[in-house]
Image (cartoon, rainbow, N blue to C red):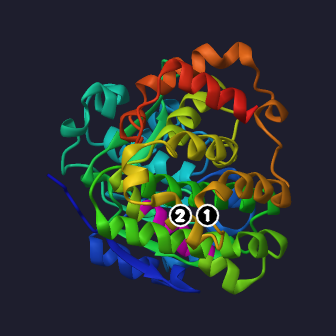
Amino acid sequence: MAFINYVTQIQFDFGAIQLLRAECERVGITKPLIVTDPGVKAAGILQKAVDALGGLPHAVFDQTPSNPTEAAVRAAAGIYKTQVCDGLIAVGGGSAIDCAKGVAIAATHEGPLSHYATIEGGSPRITEQVAPLIAVPTTSGTGSEVARGAILIVDDHRKLGFHSWHLVPKTAICDPELTFGLPPMLTAATGMDAIAHCMETFMAAAFNPPADGIALDGLARGWAHIERATRDGQDAEARRQLMSASMQGAMAFQKGLGCVHSLSHSLGGVNPRLHHGTLNAMFLAAVVRFNADAESVQRENRLNRIAHAMNLSSGSDIPNAIREMNARLGLPTGLAAMGVGSAQFEAIISGALKDHCHATNPRLATVQDYEQMLSTSL
């Protein structure tokens, strides 16, 4: 049976950050913990959020790492409890938002974080007692502001997914102006993350026509505007369209993702210094080629429909178009340029086979299939 759920309240416009206090009042948050990172603080965006609170009492955790960890979640949850907070505001990219989702669990549930991981059967253990969360994205990539999941590195170094409809932020405040200062390479990497979400969820086999439509429209917006946004960070229209693509990809990926993300999640656990969006960009062409033989992809003409959204002639043009786009954006030429070698393949494949995205790829990958995808992506 198909399960379709849309999704949360979204405030989307230039200047939407000014609605932050009103949204706290609507949700019932009287003393939030703001979860952010050093870069967002240095860019002055944290101060914009504080100013928008208009004097509302709050606490701050500003040490979210680029790949959020259970240790960071513990530290933030400690502040949440000692400062007697009653809700969370995540200000940042997917790392800050996912860290805040981890805090929403840890501050209100007992036991180690891994107890609530999806692959550990933990989703039903996440209850409505989670702390309420408002998400303010400052990148256009993960779309975590409208998603039910979070990706966190737990204490045993596994990079695990946490999924529950209780984790969906009560409000997403999407203000494209907050992305104006994003550096070109981060714009490119997070933008390709959003594009990967739209493409991969559209290829997933589950029946969810609304998700398909949202994903294709988001792909068209993201593909058409990512170069403009990367080239000129002040291009307001490009920033608006890329933020919409990010939001739409995450609205759609309740349908499922696939091998791009199972590989990226695993490799991100092997080497947490690697950027998730950049990894998705590296794997996307190889996974599209692998998925071309999937029965559901062929039956529903999915690659040609993706190609149409990308203004390409046919589905066979997609892998090369992705590689050419990565090159024009200045992203790495492949995994080898990021320091990844074949000696790491065994560990990467082991993690990918266990990842929650592995089973929702339209064609189930074997060890040999993953080896081929990794080799092609080097």
How many numbered badges does the structure rendering display? 2
- Give the CA distance from mark 1 to mark 2: 5 Å
Q: Main secondary structure of the magenta part?
A: helix
Picture residue at 53% right of the left edge, 36% below the top = 72
**Are there few (<14), some (14-19), or many (20+) residues within 10 Å of tag 2?**
some
Position of residue 179 measured from the top left corner of the image (x, y, whole percent)? 67, 71
Picture residue at 50% right of the left edge, 38% below the top = 259
Position of residue 360 measured from the top left corner of the image (x, y, whole percent)? 37, 41
Position of residue 141 measured from the top left corner of the image (x, y, whole percent)? 59, 59
Position of residue 244 measured from the top left corner of the image (x, y, whole percent)? 53, 75
Task: Provide the secondary structure element on which disc 2 rests.
Answer: helix
Amino acid type indicated by mark 1: Ser
Residue 326's disc is none
Q: Is residue 316 visible?
A: yes
Range of magenta residues: 242-250
Task: Provide the secondary structure element on which disc 1 rests.
Answer: loop
The one of 183 and 107 positioned closer to us in this rendering: 183
Q: Is residue 107 magenta?
A: no
4 relative to 122, above or below: below
Q: Is residue 247 magenta?
A: yes
The one of 40 and 225 positioned closer to us in this rendering: 225
**Are there few (<14), some (14-19), or many (20+) residues within 10 Å of tag 1?**
some
Circle 1 residue: 314
Residue 212 lies left or right of residue 306; in this view the side is left
Picture residue at 43% right of the left edge, 47% below the top = 257
Viewport quadrant of the C terminus: top right
Answer with mark 1 or mark 2, whichever residue precedes in sequence.
2
Tell me, yes or no, whether the two marked residues, 1 and 2, touch with CB atoms within 8 Å. yes
Circle 2 residue: 304
Amino acid type indicated by mark 2: Asn
Picture residue at 56% right of the left edge, 48% below the top = 95
